[in-house]
Image (cartoon, rainbow, N blue to C red):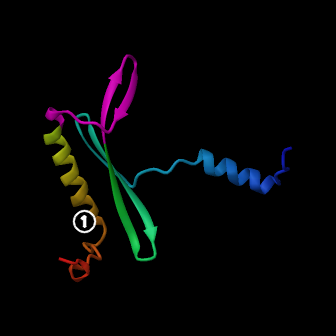
Amino acid sequence: MSVPVSPTEEDQCTLTTTTKARPVHEVRLGRIKAAIWENETQNGARHNVTLTRIYKDGEKWKDSNSFGRDDLPLVAKVADQAHTWIFENSGGSTNFDPQSIDV
């Protein structure tokens, strides 16, 4: 038995499934890419980074989150550039409290 959905709920479902979140910034060196994502929290904006390796499989471009030995120097550089972008674009604040860590 199906439950009728009002047009507003249906429109909202369509909007949710077809609207794709996009990163606020991307860093790419060769086939290694970092996508920087911004999430609003009660404490302000927070950033997360996803690292991917881009490769071609036949005629299709694909990506993977697995890296080979020779990819690692570029992964380190891309991660460093992503860190720099986040730091420069978040006003330099990290909201990190070293006193909160139990040693």
Q: Residues within 10 Å of mark 1 (few under 14, many from 20)?
A: few
Residue found at the far bottom of this picture: 99
Looking at this view, is 68 or 87 the one in front? 68
Looking at this view, is 9 or 66 the one in front? 66
At 84% across and 45% down in the image, what residue appears? 2
Residues rendered magenta in the picture: 52-71
Q: Is residue 58 magenta?
A: yes
At 21% across and 60% down in the image, what residue appears? 84
> Looking at the picture, does residue 92 appear above or below residue 24?
below
**Horizontal and vertical percent position of residue 70:** 14, 33
At 62% across and 51% down in the image, what residue appears? 16
For residue 33, side relative to residue 73 (left or right):
right
Secondary structure of the residue carrying tag 1 is: helix
Q: Quadrant of the N terminus?
A: top right
> Looking at the picture, does residue 81 appear above or below residue 52?
below
* Residue at which label 1 appears: 88
Q: Is residue 12 magenta?
A: no
For residue 84, side relative to residue 37 (left or right):
left
